[in-house]
Image (spheres, coloured by chain):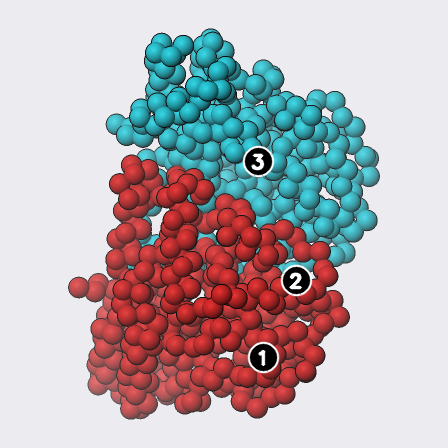
Chain colours: A cyan, B red
Amino acid sequence: MILIHNFNAGPSILPEEVYQQASRAILNLNETGVSLLSIGHRTPEFVSILEEARSLVRELMELDDEHEVLFLHGGASMQFMQVPANLLAKHGVAAIADTGVWSTKAIREAEVFGKVEVVCSSKDTNYNYIPKDFAVPNDAAYLHITTNNTIYGTQWKEIPDTGLPLVADMSSDILSRKINFNRFALIYAGAQKNIGAAGVTLVVVNRRILGKIKRKIPTLLDYRNHIREQSLLSTPPVFAVYVAMLTLRWLKNNGGVAEMEKRNREKAAMLYKAIDEMPLFRAHVAAEDRSDMNVCFSMADKQLEPKFLQYCTENDIYGIAGHRLAGAFRASLYNALPRESVEHLIKVMKAFSAQFG
Amino acid sequence: MILIHNFNAGPSILPEEVYQQASRAILNLNETGVSLLSIGHRTPEFVSILEEARSLVRELMELDDEHEVLFLHGGASMQFMQVPANLLAKHGVAAIADTGVWSTKAIREAEVFGKVEVVCSSKDTNYNYIPKDFAVPNDAAYLHITTNNTIYGTQWKEIPDTGLPLVADMSSDILSRKINFNRFALIYAGAQKNIGAAGVTLVVVNRRILGKIKRKIPTLLDYRNHIREQSLLSTPPVFAVYVAMLTLRWLKNNGGVAEMEKRNREKAAMLYKAIDEMPLFRAHVAAEDRSDMNVCFSMADKQLEPKFLQYCTENDIYGIAGHRLAGAFRASLYNALPRESVEHLIKVMKAFSAQFG
């Protein structure tokens, strides 16, 4: 029985069995008598957890041999700087698509290391669409995109093919849909949406993109060191890696990425349809760019919004308030969010409409 | 009843009540019905956890108003580079005391950003003492020391007073003894010894040391941004911050730093005395520099070492093997390690001596 319907944008809901297993491991990891929090990170127990997590990523993303899987400290925000530190020479150019706040942060950090060309932007309409036609400088080191924009509810449905090495912040839609992940030179994703709990970041990097610039890179920022040390360059965030492993295991046991895509499409389609049908609610994102992960909507009558939020809380709906920069509402429908929660939300929206519409 | 005596050097033992509370919070945080892993990091629930953790640090360390308390991503290894990125100008000098592997890493990262003068070293005797008399360049930006050397079992009993701003890696002895923490310009410590679980790093920094160099610092590396955003510059490692808060709360409820120091001294004295009295075992660290946190010892007859390790395992002693660079044995006696575990270890050493001595 679901007690609370958790639509949080991240940190967000995880599968129930992940909570149960993580909770138990803190008391006693695999009947070793030792807590997960108190095992050495170079013990066979932890190394096998880390290896399972890395190998599940490889399997679920169907990665080729050129791509390396790393679990790193620091969140996706660290990658905003770590990517250009490794890939952008002082006089090089990073081509970056500006589709929201997170892209803007990626732009700002890249500017610390080299030059940036913002190749397109949807800022003019508060980021409610994904730019389609844009040119890139041929000599750019890479093109950076944010595949899903959590705050505004937009998603790149087509991954652009520009000939440039492709770098993607996939924090909020990784492992949610089938993509040819091998097309990317580098992918990064904070764990706290589809991978696990906050405190670890997944990086998938094509080895061949590394080592091309001359900058002295601090040890902990150089991806090559993490590859060499197999994500054990320094003490890893043990607990967050364990939760990621459990979540990836759940994902595999539930049909993998293809099945997640199917479920996510159904959940999102159901909710967008309900919004479009109810005069009280409206979605602002261009229909073809609507995110399957974050469904943003507002109300025709702004004054009803606090009342609806209150109504949601009374009906066990949690985490539905929009981001402070976008306002109104946002329902995040990550892999672990059950279909029942979406059905419940629609029921509540309908009941509210009947009462106040 | 203690099932396993966990002498791990880190990640290491935590108080039993911390395991219990963390385990429960993963299922249901404070009866909210939501898992700790799935709450937003800007919710009142998490903000109050973070604020309690920061305020406990302030209280336990008796910090003055110039010192800021930050919980950051990345482990102490990130600080090896973050410290010079913030404090060391390109042509500036960092004075660094070399007392082991971790100091060596701090030296290497500082060299990426500026110049380093190694002001003393105990490398000549495999780091089994703390250098006492050394000169520092007057114009150095700071003096960096590693207050406790986990691998070799040495500890600075006197904090040097050179007139230079003092930076300390306190990863393995923070909050274990009374020190005037306000004397330090900057203190950092990975959480996984005395503060909590791996995945978060405590930084205590005197505001007045910041902003003195001209380098463009990436957003996430600039301490000033973390101070401004109160450790919420990016999604924090929520779980690791929670475990730190619980551990700090336990520390306060158990008499604070003064009481920890008393207990730690007793535990260490008891074990060193036993080692010195038993002909089978020997401690190599200069008596006046022996760490109260990590007691390193070996055996007179090297060939007995694997046998003693096996004997420990059979007697529920865990994590006693020395670091791969030091070999032999190491018993880590952090705050949360009960006196009973030390008594048990001594009993086991005596029984082994009786049988094989």
Q: Position of residue A65 (x, y in %)?
A: 60, 42
Q: Is residue A164 left or right of residue B62?
A: right
Of badges 2 and 1, nearer the viewer stands: 2
Q: Which residue is mark 1?
A: B97
Chain on which label 2 sits = B
Q: Nearer the viewer, residue A199 or A228?
A: A199
Q: Residues within 10 Å of mark 3 (few under 14, many from 20)?
A: many
Chain on which label 3 sits = A
Q: Nearer the viewer, residue B251 or A44?
A: B251
Q: Nearer the viewer, residue B254 or B173?
A: B254
Q: What label sits on residue A170 in the rendered view? A: 3
Q: CA distance from mark 1 to mark 3?
A: 42 Å
Quarter of the rendering containing residue B93:
bottom right
Quarter containing the N terminus of chain B: bottom left
| Amino acid identity at mark 2 | Gly
Most extreme residue toward the left, as rendered?
A: B1
Q: Which residue is mark 2?
A: B211
Q: Position of residue B148 (x, y in %)?
A: 46, 76
Residue drawn at (73%, 61%) of the image: B214
| Amino acid identity at mark 1 | Ala
Q: Is residue A37 left or right of residue A124?
A: left
Residue drawn at (75%, 70%) of the image: B91
* Element type where label 1 sits in the image: strand
Q: Position of residue B267 (x, y in %)?
A: 29, 79
